Every structure is written in C-alpha cells, then in structure tokens.
Image (cartoon, rainbow, N blue to C red):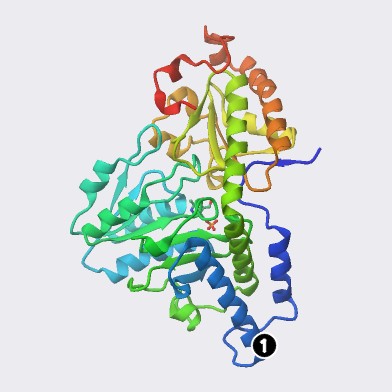
C-alpha cells in the first residue's frame, strides 16, 4: 500500500513542477548571476523572477525586500543579529516560550555570551500568548520582539500584527518566524507593521536549503554573511540558483492554490480529528482550535508515549511525528506542550499530524481506521492505563477534558 505522509510541518515533497524548474540551472544555465555576459544575465533574470514570486506570495511591497538565505534558521539568526547590531543602545529581546530552536538556541547563546536580556513570554493552555506579559516586557531597552506566526507543533496562530504595532510603540523592531505560516494562510505585508519575516522553501513544496528573509524597506539591516555584493550586499556568497528558482516556483504554485487548498486541507484535517475523537477515548487536541493553520492537528493520547504510537503507525506506512523533527529522538516532552501546561497524562503521548495539498481523503480514512487498534493495543500493555477505572467509557469522553474547555474540539 502507498505510504501516507502526514509530517508536512517537518518537510514537504518537492513537487515535480519545482524540480523541472530547477533542472536547467544544474545544466545549460550554469552561469554566475554576477557575470556581465549572457550566461550571467540569463541566471540573474531567473533570480529576479523568483524574487517577485516570493514577493507576491507574502504580499510585500517591493521585490528588493526579499533576501534569499539558506532557509528558516539562517533567516531567523540574521534577523535577530541584525536588530542587535543596528540598535546598539537596546539590549533586550522579547520572544515566546514556544518558538522553534532556530530562535531559542540563538537567544540562549546571546544571553550567555553577550549578556542580552531575553523575555520569554508564556502561553495559556490553548497556546495563546500572554498579551499582558508581552506588554509589560516592552520598554525603552527592547531591541526586538520576535514572535512566530504559526507554531510548528500545534499550528496555533499568533496575533503578529497587533504584537508588531505594540513593539513599534516601544520603539522596537518586530520579526516573525513565519516558516509554518507562509503558503498555508494568505499574508499581505504591504499593509503590515512587521519589519522582518522568515520563510523556508522546504515547508511549501520547494527544495531544502533555501529560504528568504523579508526586510521591510527602510529597516536598518546588517548582514550575517559578509562577502560579495550579492543580494544588494545583504547576504554574501554566490547564489544557490537552482534553490532560488525552486523556491520561486514553489511560491508561485502556493500562491495560485492558496484559497482552494486551504479549505480542502482544513476539511481533511477536521475529518481526521473527528474520526479520531469519535473512535478513541481519552484523547485531546492541543492548541488553539479556532486559530490554527489549516493543515496541523496535534492530538494527545492520554497515558501513552508518542514513540510506540509513531512506530506502529510507521509499520502501517503512516508517517507522523511527535512534534518538531529537531527534537525527535529525545525523550524530553515538547517544550511547547510544557509551556501550555498540558496535563502530565497527555504530555508524552502527543502526535502531530500535518497535512499538505497532496493529502487525500483515502489517506486520512486509512489513518482513522488504523489508529483505534494501535491505541487500544498499546493501552492494554500500559500499566497506568490499566489502573484507570474509566477504561471502556464512551468514546471521546474524557472526565479531565470536561473540566478543560481549552482542549475542546
Ligand atoms: N522555524 C520554524 C517554525 C520551523 O518549523 C522550522 C523548521 O522546522 C525552522 C524555523 C527552520 O527552518 P529551516 O529548516 O529552513 O532552517
């Protein structure tokens, strides 16, 4: 049976149109975009087109607001380090407790090595940012607020426009890691207060190792990588031309398909959730169910660990994950779910299902069919589960959930 891929927040398949667009740049069109001869100008034209395609996808006002990078991680690092360098009198950064390691690792390092103060703003049990704490943290020393647009584990969306306006009131810059939002929801940066934004090719059916940082016109900027004058002096190094072209094509396809895809993907995600919640007891949806990207569902199966669930799904040819791919292999529960204070019984058994525009109804139905047997088999082997008096109560009914509306479907 064909495998079912429900781990699109980790990475997506590079679609064939994207591969086809890239191929000539491994062959006949091998020129260096900086060269003044025809080989160079062919390539620089393709890069210009890709920049415009990315611009259109995020609704940026100018194509030169797009700086190509090696991916989301580099874009995040560049934004943070640039903000610190361009505002020397300000040494505090505000972020959320649920950011991706691309943000958290650098900020931890800067705290240790440069004495930067970092305010980690908490979230509630739905994963929503504590707005009061965010406002309290802003002040004359705030250099940058960096808050993700959509959380990679739960899909929860953050009110980044409001957060950007508040940051500006304090004279600070605002950056958003939008790696899990771009291509999934419509963005319009023309009317936005956001100063910098990160995106990544491989999350939207483009290639790996390519991404972009949006830098709003007029925002002071210092490059992370110094070298030649590529990217208007904002990122040194000969361009990854096939990658840039692939990202451009992926952006074009994502933009064209955005409306229809979003509704189809949401319908499939909701079908999956209803199927699971209707047939398996003691499970809960993690995250803000009303404000999520349409492709993501994070479900905890109480009293179980995610690893055996994933292993059993894998044996059935179904790929999902326990959260961020970067954290898999570690037995530590997810920092996102811990920040949300997900109850202990549900903390280790969270599975992230992330769909794409390639996901089919048949794949969702196969997942819904397989899961009840897997979960009941594992629960039968799990001592804490056997101790529960509530085993065998009506499907979907969970006494703990009834007192916690944050996890209602
Ligand atoms: N930020 C978020 C929210 C992500 O989900 C990821 C990838 O998982 C990244 C950043 C890193 O992006 P990249 O893999 O392109 O470096």
Which residue is drawn at the image coordinates 58% and 62% (left, top)?
Answer: 251
Which residue is drawn at the image coordinates 48% and 63% (left, top)?
Answer: 74
Residue 234, relative to residue 190: is it above or below? Answer: below
Image quadrant occupied by the N terminus: top right
> Counting other residues with Cα less than 10 Å from the Cα at mark 1, is it few (<14), some (14-19), or many (20 or more)?
some
Count of residue discs: 1
Q: Position of residue 146 (x, y in %)?
A: 36, 55
* The one of 49 and 213 positioned closer to us in this rendering: 49
Describe the element under mark 1 as helix, strand or loop: helix
Residue 6, relative to residue 243: is it above or below? Answer: above
Residue 343, relative to residue 165: is it above or below? Answer: above
Residue 6, relative to residue 108: is it above or below? Answer: above
Q: Is residue 32 left or right of residue 101?
A: right
Where residue 98 sits, quadrant-wise, is top left
Q: Position of residue 82 (x, y in %)?
A: 36, 68
* The one of 379 and 241 positioned closer to us in this rendering: 241
Q: Is residue 263 left or right of residue 231?
A: right
Q: Position of residue 198 (x, y in %)?
A: 46, 60
Asked whether residue 338 is in view, the answer is yes
Q: Residue furthest left?
A: 140
Which residue is drawn at the image coordinates 62% and 43% (left, top)?
Answer: 264
* The one of 281 and 142 positioned closer to us in this rendering: 281
Residue annotated with mark 1: 39
Q: Residue furthest right?
A: 1
């Amino acid at each position: 049976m064909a495998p079912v891929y429900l781990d699109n927040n980790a990475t997506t398949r590079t679609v064939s149109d994207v591969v086809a667009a890239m191929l000539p740049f491994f062959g006949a069109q091998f020129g260096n975009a900086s060269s003044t001869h025809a080989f160079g100008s062919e390539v620089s034209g393709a890069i210009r087109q890709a920049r415009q395609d990315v611009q259109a996808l995020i609704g940026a006002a100018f194509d030169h607001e797009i700086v190509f990078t090696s991916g989301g991680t580099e874009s995040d690092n560049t934004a943070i380090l640039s903000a610190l360098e361009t505002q020397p009198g300000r040494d505090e950064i505000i972020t959320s407790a649920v950011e991706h390691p691309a943000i958290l690792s650098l900020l931890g390092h800067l705290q240790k090595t440069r004495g930067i103060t970092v305010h980690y703003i908490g979230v509630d049990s739905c994963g929503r940012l504590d707005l009061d704490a965010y406002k309290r943290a802003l002040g004359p020393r705030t250099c940058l607020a960096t808050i993700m647009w959509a959380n990679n584990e739960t899909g929860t969306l953050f009110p980044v426009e409001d957060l950007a306006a508040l940051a500006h009131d304090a004279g600070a810059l605002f950056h958003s890691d939008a790696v899990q939002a771009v291509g999934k929801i419509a963005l319009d940066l023309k009317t936005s207060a956001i100063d910098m934004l990160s995106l990544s090719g491989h999350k939207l059916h483009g290639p790996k190792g390519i991404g972009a940082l949006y830098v709003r016109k007029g925002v002071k900027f210092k490059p992370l990588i110094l070298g030649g004058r590529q990217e208007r002096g904002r990122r040194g190094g000969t361009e990854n031309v096939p990658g840039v072209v692939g990202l451009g094509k992926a952006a074009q396809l994502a933009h064209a398909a955005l409306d229809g895809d979003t509704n189809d993907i949401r319908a499939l995600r909701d079908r999956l959730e209803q199927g699971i919640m209707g047939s398996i007891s003691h499970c809960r949806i993690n995250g803000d169910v009303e404000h999520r990207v349409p492709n993501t569902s994070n479900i905890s199966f109480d009293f179980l660990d995610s690893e055996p669930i994933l292993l059993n799904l894998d044996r059935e040819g179904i790929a999902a994950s326990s959260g961020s791919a970067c954290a898999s292999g570690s037995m530590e529960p997810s920092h996102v779910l811990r920040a949300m204070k997900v109850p202990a019984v549900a903390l280790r058994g969270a599975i992230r299902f992330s769909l794409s525009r390639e996901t089919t109804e048949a794949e969702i139905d196969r997942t819904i069919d397989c899961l009840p047997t897997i979960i009941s088999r594992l629960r039968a082997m799990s001592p804490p589960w056997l101790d529960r008096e509530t085993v065998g109560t009506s499907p979907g009914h969970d006494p703990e959930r009834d007192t916690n509306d944050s996890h209602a479907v």
